[in-house]
Amino acid sequence: MSPEHARICADAGMSKQDVKQYLFENAWRLSGDVRGLGVLGFGEAVPRWVTDGDDTRRLSPLRDPDRLLLWVAGGDVGGYSAVIFGGSRSVTHKI
């Protein structure tokens, strides 16, 4: 998260956990919207939502808010934040 976005969240009274919960609740797309984009999952197996015909299923990259690693990095060059997606469990080490 950029420092600018972190300040906006902090000024709104949001804690780190609040931001993670907000992203968990709002970072999703409907399966019908995604199906037409050619984003059909990873690996060889075709996910069930591709073929089951349910266009109203919410698709999210997050299983729960605590799986989201959130940190502030970068400079004050504008409101640019990034999402880095990984296909496995993240491991961090304090340096």
Image (spheres, rainbow, N blue to C red):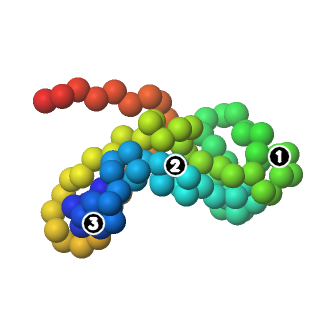
**Which residue is the site of mark 1?**
51
Looking at the figure, which quarter contains the C terminus? top left
Position above or below: 28 against 8? above
Q: Residues within 10 Å of mark 3 (few under 14, many from 20)?
A: few
> Which one is earlier in the sequence, the residue at label 1 or at label 3?
3
Position above or below: 44 against 16? above
For marks 3 and 2, give the one nearer the viewer. 3
**Residue under the image location 33 percent in, 48 percent down:** 16
- Image coordinates for residue 13, horizontal then vertical, percent: 32, 60
Distance, label 3 to label 2, CA atoms, is: 20 Å
**Which residue is the site of mark 3?**
11
Q: Residues within 10 Å of mark 1 (few under 14, many from 20)?
A: few
* Whether residue 13 can be seen here: yes
Specify the amino acid type for callout 1: Thr
- Do residues under tags 1 and 2 come within 8 Å of each other at their CB atoms? no
Please state which of residues 40 and 85 is positioned toward the viewer in this rendering: 85
